[in-house]
Structure formats: structure tokens, C-alpha cells
Image: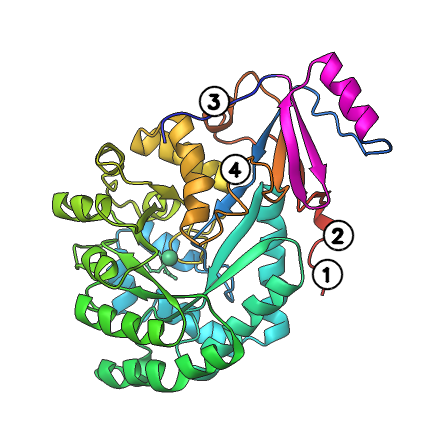
């Protein structure tokens, strides 16, 4: 993760939606390329830097309403857990999502998708988990599927029915889990609604044993496991995830030495979410230790109304450099190639390689790519190209 390859004065040749070639662009090479590719459209980067588009492997961008009331309650001293125990938090979002229609959810999620696309995100994962009933979870997953079919961003879908226990099952978590497994998972499999299944493994949410039970059932229904692990306390989510063969375990603020060893010996990708950690004022996950142990750490946004109302991956990269002491090289690799691994997209996304999707962005003229995380409040992206086509906000996701 420590070294990003960079070519100065480079060319990139796109054929269709794929990267066909790239290299150093001296005048002989340019003359040859122009001769071999007559009539091809040329884009001058004007001293800007071209980078593979961001891959956001962890988002909850389908939601209804916002939660700035909880934001101000936290400023006044309440914790995330205290707010949740009073019926705020995930249950607050669930109440609003249940009332929202599919067109309303589509429209608001499309607005967020356009925003993150113009900030350089070219592929992302979206979770359900604000429905918390068979009808509303399936409604969310249908909205995610519709988004995936309606625009150029690559979208992977995750079933997160085990995000919280809904109020109608209060004190009866066993029954809720059984509803997820018996009623919802077969529908998901039948209609191809999710590639992954995630569980919020945490005190007052789902235990490590419940996490394993849900993930085993999910595998039997064709979904690959993921876990929200060790975010607010050490709850055993990393171990449960690794034992279930999870593709990724995410958050990790309370990961310990044993967890890091297990992660380094597994194929499971540790995903850190500095936006949520920053927004909730949690402690840092042990990122340097994970990198030193040999883990392929990934970086994502967690875009959601409760713990991270931002999907700006440029900001996540800056936060990772500033708070975790990741170098810009490490943070950029974490937010592209490693993040693509965390959602099974690394064959086609996450780096500039021949045969991968031509999904990248070009910055304004900047002195070096280190300037990108350094200028933490600026949007330096000038042009976004997805699948070989330059995109503009107004053309994306029109419903
Ligand atoms: O990833 N940790 C659990 N889920 C979300 C927060 C969801 C919410 O507060 O709405 C997260 O931080
Ligand atoms: Fe999350």
C-alpha cells in the first residue's frame, strides 16, 4: 500500500468503456497514437492529475429525512447510544423510511448519487437497513436495484436487515432474526436483490453469535457476508466475520491486537470509515498497526443520515491522512484498489490498468497528487469520466 505509481506527462487511451493503453506522452508517442486512432476525441488534462475514480465500499445513501436534531443533541452532551436508546438513531430513520414511497426514495438517493459522482466516486455499495420490516427492506433493495440500472455508476447492493431490532420486535430479537431469514432472504434470492449481507454486530444490536447465524443463512441464500464490527465497543464482530468468510469487516475503532492478527491472516478486508468516526467523535481505529501487520486496509465514507452525512471521498482521504497518519499514497490506494476489493469489483475498477473500466477523474492543475488530501476543504476535481464518457450532473439519474 505504500507506493502509488505515478507517470508524469502521461497519456491515457480509452476504447469504448475501457482503458486501452497508457504511458508517457512524448511527441513521438503522441504522433503515433494520433495516427493509429484517427478521429479519436482528445481531452487535455491541462496540467491536472488523472486518478482512478473513488470506490466507496460502504454507504447507506438510500434514506428518508435527516437527523440534524440528533447532531445538536450530541453537541449538547448525549451519546450516539443514549440517543438510540430513546428511539432516535437507526429507528428514527426507519420510521421515516417506512412512510416514504419508492419514487421519493429514488429521487433523494439519485440526488446524493449525482453529488458523489461529481466528487469522483465511480462505484459504490449501498445498504438496506432502514426498512427493518420485510416490505420496507425489500422496498429499499428495489430502489437500490433501480439506481443500479439507471446510471453509469457501478452499484453493489447489501442486505442489512440486521441493522437494529425494530420497535415491534422489542424484546423479541430471536423472532425478528427468524423473519429476516425465513421471509426476507428467500425473496432477495428469488429477485436477485443483493450481493452482500451485513450485520451491525454491537451491544444492544446483534451479538457475535447472532451475527454468525444471520451470515450463515445469508450465504445459503447466495449473499456474501460483511460486518459492521467493533464500532462502539469490542463485540467480537471481526472474529465472527472472519469465521463466516466475510469479504469485509467495517468501522473497527475497538479492534484489538488479536483481531489485527486474524485480519492479517485472512482474506477479509478491513474497511475504515473516518467520516463516521470523526462525526461521532469516536477514537481512531488502529490503522497503522493493521497496515504494519500486512492488512489491505480500505477506506470508505459510510454516507448515512446518522453517523456520516457526507459521501465526499476526497474528504475521507484527507481525514485518513490527518487522523490515522496514513500517507497520501496509502489513503489513495485504500480508497480505490482496496475498496474495490471490499465489494468484489477489483477486476474492473480501482486502478489504471489496461482492460479495466475507463472510470477516472481529472483534477485542476495541482503541484503533486499529495495536494489533494492536503487541500482538505477544496473540490479540486474538474472532469469525471465514467465508463469512457465524461459526465455532468444534469445528465445523470433522471427519473
Ligand atoms: O455505519 N453503525 C451502524 N450503522 C451506521 C449508522 C446508522 C445510523 O445512525 O443511521 C453506521 O455508522
Ligand atoms: Fe455503516
| Mark 2 nearby-residue class (10 Å; few <14, some 14–19, many ≥20) | few
Left or right: 138 as drawn, with respect to 164: right
Marks 4 and 2 sit apart, C-alpha to C-alpha, by 25 Å
Left or right: 27 as drawn, with respect to 262: right
The answer to which of marks 1 and 3 sits earlier in the sequence is: 3
1 vs 4, front mark: 4
- State the mark number for residue 395: 2
Whether 252 is drawn above or below 228: the answer is above
Q: Residue at x 35, y 80 (%)?
A: 180
Residue 76 forms part of the magenta stretch: no
Which quadrant holds residue 87? bottom left
Which quadrant holds residue 52? top right
- Figure quadrant, ligand 1: bottom left
Left or right: 134 as drawn, with respect to 247: right
| Mark 4 nearby-residue class (10 Å; few <14, some 14–19, many ≥20) | many
**Residue range corresponding to the magenta coloring:** 9-36
Amino acid at each position: 500500500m505504500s507506493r502509488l505509481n505515478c507517470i508524469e506527462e502521461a497519456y491515457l487511451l480509452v476504447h469504448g468503456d475501457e482503458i486501452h493503453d497508457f504511458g508517457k506522452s512524448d511527441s513521438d508517442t503522441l504522433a503515433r497514437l494520433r495516427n493509429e486512432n484517427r478521429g479519436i476525441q482528445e481531452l487535455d488534462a491541462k496540467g491536472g492529475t488523472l486518478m482512478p475514480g473513488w470506490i466507496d465500499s460502504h454507504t447507506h445513501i438510500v434514506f428518508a429525512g435527516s437527523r440534524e436534531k440528533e447532531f445538536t443533541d450530541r453537541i449538547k452532551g448525549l451519546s450516539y447510544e443514549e440517543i438510540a436508546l430513546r428511539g432516535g438513531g437507526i429507528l428514527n430513520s426507519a420510521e421515516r423510511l417506512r412512510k416514504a414511497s419508492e419514487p421519493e426514495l429514488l429521487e433523494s438517493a439519485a440526488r446524493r448519487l449525482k453529488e458523489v459522482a461529481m466528487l469522483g466516486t465511480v462505484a459504490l455499495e449501498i445498504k438496506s437497513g432502514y426498512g427493518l420490516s420485510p416490505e420496507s427492506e425489500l422496498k429499499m433493495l428495489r430502489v437500490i436495484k433501480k439506481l443500479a440500472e439507471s446510471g453509469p455508476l457501478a452499484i453493489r447492493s447489501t442486505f442489512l436487515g440486521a441493522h437494529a431490532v425494530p420497535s415491534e420486535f422489542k424484546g423479541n430479537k430471536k423472532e425478528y432474526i427468524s423473519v429476516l431469514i425465513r421471509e426476507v432472504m428467500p425473496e432477495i434470492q428469488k429477485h436477485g436483490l443483493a450481493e452482500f449481507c451485513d450485520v451491525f454486530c454491537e451491544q444492544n444490536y446483534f451479538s457475535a453469535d447472532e451475527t454468525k447465524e444471520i451470515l450463515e443463512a445469508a450465504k445459503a441464500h447466495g449473499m456474501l457476508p460483511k460486518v459492521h464490527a467493533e464500532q462502539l465497543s469490542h463485540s467480537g464482530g471481526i472474529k465472527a466475520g472472519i469465521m463466516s468468510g466475510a469479504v469485509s469487516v467495517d468501522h473497527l475503532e475497538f479492534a484489538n491486537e488479536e483481531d489485527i492478527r486474524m485480519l492479517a491472516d485472512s482474506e477479509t478486508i478491513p474497511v475504515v470509515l473516518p467520516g463516521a468516526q470523526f462525526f461521532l467523535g469516536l477514537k481512531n481505529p488502529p490503522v497503522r498497526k493493521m497496515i504494519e501487520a500486512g492488512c489491505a486496509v480500505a477506506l470508505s465514507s459510510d454516507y448515512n443520515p446518522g453517523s456520516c452525512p457526507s459521501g465526499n471521498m476526497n474528504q475521507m482521504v484527507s481525514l485518513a491522512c490527518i487522523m490515522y497518519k496514513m500517507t497520501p499514497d496509502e489513503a489513495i490506494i485504500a480508497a480505490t484498489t482496496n475498496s474495490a476489493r471490499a465489494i468484489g469489483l477489483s477486476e474492473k475498477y480501482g486502478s489504471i490498468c489496461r482492460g479495466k473500466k475507463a472510470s477516472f477523474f481529472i483534477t485542476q492543475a495541482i503541484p503533486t497528487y499529495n495536494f489533494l488530501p492536503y487541500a482538505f476543504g477544496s473540490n479540486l476535481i474538474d472532469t469525471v469520466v465514467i465508463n469512457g464518457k465524461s459526465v455532468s450532473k444534469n445528465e445523470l439519474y433522471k427519473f
